[in-house]
Amino acid sequence: MENFQGYSSALGKMQSPRTKRSVKASASVRHSTCQPKTSAEIISEARTSLRILKTQRPFTPKDDQRKLFGLTSSRTEEIRPPSSFSLHARSFEGSESRPLSVARLSPLDHKPKIATCKDEQPPIPKPPLDPIEIKRVSSARARLFKVTSQGNLLPDKTSHPEEIIKKLNSDGSLSNKNTSYDADKSATSQLNTNISAIWSTKCEGEEMMPDRITEQTSSLSSPNSLESEFVKQDVGLSNSPGSTENIKEPNRSELKSGSRPHEEESEEEILYWNMKIQPILDELKPLSSGNSVEHLCQTCYRLHYTLQEGNMLGKMCKRRALLLKTLYKLVDLGSDKLSIELAKLILALKVSGKNLLNVSKLMFKVSRSENNDALFQNDEILDYLLEVFRFADPLSNIDAFLYFMGTIKFLTGNVILLKDLLNKGLVESLVQLMKEINDANRTSDTYFCSSGHLLVQVTATLRNLAELPQSRSRFLGTGALSELCVIMEQHINDKDICLNVARIFSKLSAYNDFCLVLSECFSCYQLFLTILHRHQRKQDLIVRVVFILGNMTAKNNDAREELYKQENSVETLLTLFQIYHELNIKRKLTPPLTQSEKGMTESKSQKPSEVEDVLIKLIRVIANLSINSEVGSALSGNWTCVELLIKVLESNKVEECEELMMNAAATINNLSYYQVKKSAIRTRQLHIAELMMKLLLCNSMDAILEGARVFGNLSRSKEIRDFIVQKNVDKFMITLLDAKHQDVCFAACGVLINLTVDKSKRPILKQDGGIKKLIDCLRDFGLTDWQLASLVCKTLWNYSEKITIAALCFGEEETGELLELLSAYLDEGIALDLETNGSDEQLVEQHKVCWESEFVPVARQLLQRIQRHHSHLEPLPFSPAQN
């Protein structure tokens, strides 16, 4: 038989009681109790000596503080938008922007000449003013100063009321269709309208409020006339040359909302407003009427319903500015519940510009408290939140989107809201948002910095969504992976964005279908390597990237080849290996803990440190890469790689970090599989064997198993076989046959079969009771693990090469038991009966193939050899000379 050089990855455990029952009886018992799990797992996965490694996802502590940027953010307070701010009614604008007008202003006949140094002339003296005129101008300036001090600027040109009236009388396009007022009142209303238009220029983003206009013009018009004309002015009916706003093309919100700002109210709309809307607005006066917050919330709800019934949501309402002004005043009450009702109404009216920013801040403030999550659960506010993605342009309203996304990010921390947002299409909306930002950043750097702040919120929200298993199909079906890779590539120096994307991928890469899609995105390999190179000291980012690479290379050979052939891929991984190994050594050189500190440390569950966690997942990538024959052969001859693995085994203890030691041993096991001429493993095999003794002598069965596997590969060398006998490792392997663990027995058999290659070492099996224990393994595990049964038969075949009498070779009792077991196991009925109850046809077929190809050939040869040399020996007569 050839030397043993293979055994499987860790599979399910199974313990079977030793019994002297018949084989068929034993089979029926095991089938009923253990077969549904253990047998299927063993048969479905063939044992090889090259094993993939598994590890836990990096742990991320929950951030209890709800902020735009967490405590670990790389952004300084000077460059990042604030999470705390003051918000009042005066922060909002009375009207938003001038509406679209098809009229075009005619060019000026006179083009003013800009004075230069050459054109300067002595000033022309002016005649002194009349004292009466001076007094009149002073009074006007005093009134003007009172107005401008409240947030309005002086217009460039003033007009006398008489001139305005004449102009309005001659302009039929601006005449009011409502003829219920007499001519004087109509003219006065038009006068008020134009005065309002003239004096409504903005000062620092705010316009003069209607009540201030009323104070200036109360002697000229009635309140109802003023209100009507102000509404027309607020929605932009005025086309006064004195306006400081520029004519602009229709924006995204105006096109999508079906706005009709240039149209005047119909009689039906006026009647609906006076009968339905105005009475509700009169109730929204908390300071005068003393309404409670609860009553105001109910009133806002009725107002919302009434506007919807009258088709006045969006920008359909002519008196929208007056409506918004009333709502803005309620912000100062500071009630979170009322703020949600106000935000829902304001969003339903599809505000834009500064008002969109302020309503986003309003919801952001409410969502910062987890206690307010219930306010978002019991309302339609989520629908209006997501509607913003459809009617507002993110690049034109990037600050507003920042706080909207901050709000959504907070809400996705709540499991109930997280599921609701997923079902409402949040993933699809965010993917479209990312695409728009990525496309803009490809062509221009205008929004690069501000979009980076926004993308932090977007990727953090997607990170929360990735927690839900049902979100995986949405990530795969929307093209989210490619957009996230583009974001990471464009913002590769932004640690916050890269970390969020890495956290998304680390969560989703736990699934094979995601790893398959990601592995087919060939640009991601070099992208991940670039991140590892640029952010070498950022542990939280590095540990997640190597975790993703470990998942990608676990079961995909194409991913192993693609990663390996990237430029400087191995050098990058080994450089990180060196850096974090040195950091781990420095960490261990810190002063020792006191007895009380040691007691507190031991009482906690032992978890690897942050540095050790990087090493664990980095070594896992190397182990998974080495499964590929080309990569594994190259790495087995890489001295830097092998020396680093040896240093890890030298500088650590199993009791301190078991997973790190096991991963290093498993990687050496994979590399030791390849028999290359310049193998660094083979050169250092004796030292490696000594290090494996640390694993064999610990109290962890998993670590013992890894050490036994390494000895299984190394024992192909005679030098190592001599070491095994010298250090009594052979006796330890025979003892492991009693472990009642299939994989442990399999690994021990692997070492014993290699020992039987040397004829001088074969008697060890019988001297230490190895024959008896091998037969027990065959009986206990043979029916459910044909690979282990085959390995036991191979070991017994090597041992019995020079057999003359079976009873003398194996023992009388052992020989009889072998004949019974082998005869029964070679019965095809046993192999077929085991998997027919509750197993699918594929597993039954795999079980049968394993039985036929691996067990039957060697078992039949061993049975024939034993039968050929079997005889019943008579007891020898007693002779005194024998004493």
Image (tube, helix red, strand yellow):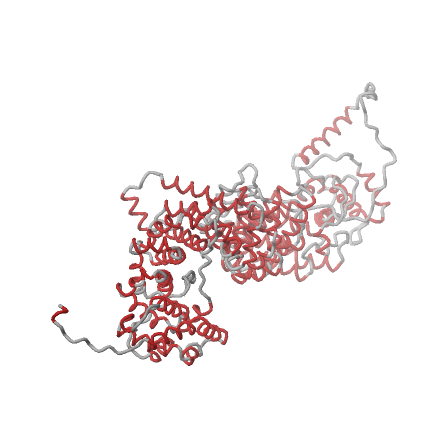
Q: Position of residue 677 (x, y in %)?
A: 48, 51
Q: Position of residue 170 (x, y in %)?
A: 86, 45
**Relative vertical location of residue 595 with respect to residue 54 in this rendering, above or below:** above
Quarter holding residue 203:
top right
Instruction: For residue 109, say whether it is visible.
Output: yes
> How many marks can you see?
0
| Residue occupying the point 13% across, 69% down | 881
Residue extending farthest to the right is 109
Q: Give whichever of 242, 778 is nearer the camera.
A: 778
| Residue occupying the point 66% across, 57% down | 277
| Residue 453 placement, left or right of 71 | right
Residue extending farthest to the left is 880
Instruction: For residue 292, say whether it is visible.
Output: no
Quarter holding residue 354:
top right
Q: Give whichever of 152, 187 is nearer the camera.
A: 152
| Residue 35 placement, left or right of 629 | left
Residue extending farthest to the top is 122
**Relative vertical location of residue 579 with respect to residue 857 in this rendering, above or below:** above
Q: Give whichever of 251, 330 is nearer the camera.
A: 251
**Relative vertical location of residue 769 with respect to residue 835 in this rendering, above or below:** above
For the N terminus, give its image quadrant: bottom left
Q: Position of residue 479 (x, y in %)?
A: 62, 57
| Residue 783 placement, left or right of 459 | left
| Residue 45 placement, left or right of 405 | left
Q: Position of residue 232 (x, y in %)?
A: 74, 49
For the C terminus, give its image quadrant: bottom left
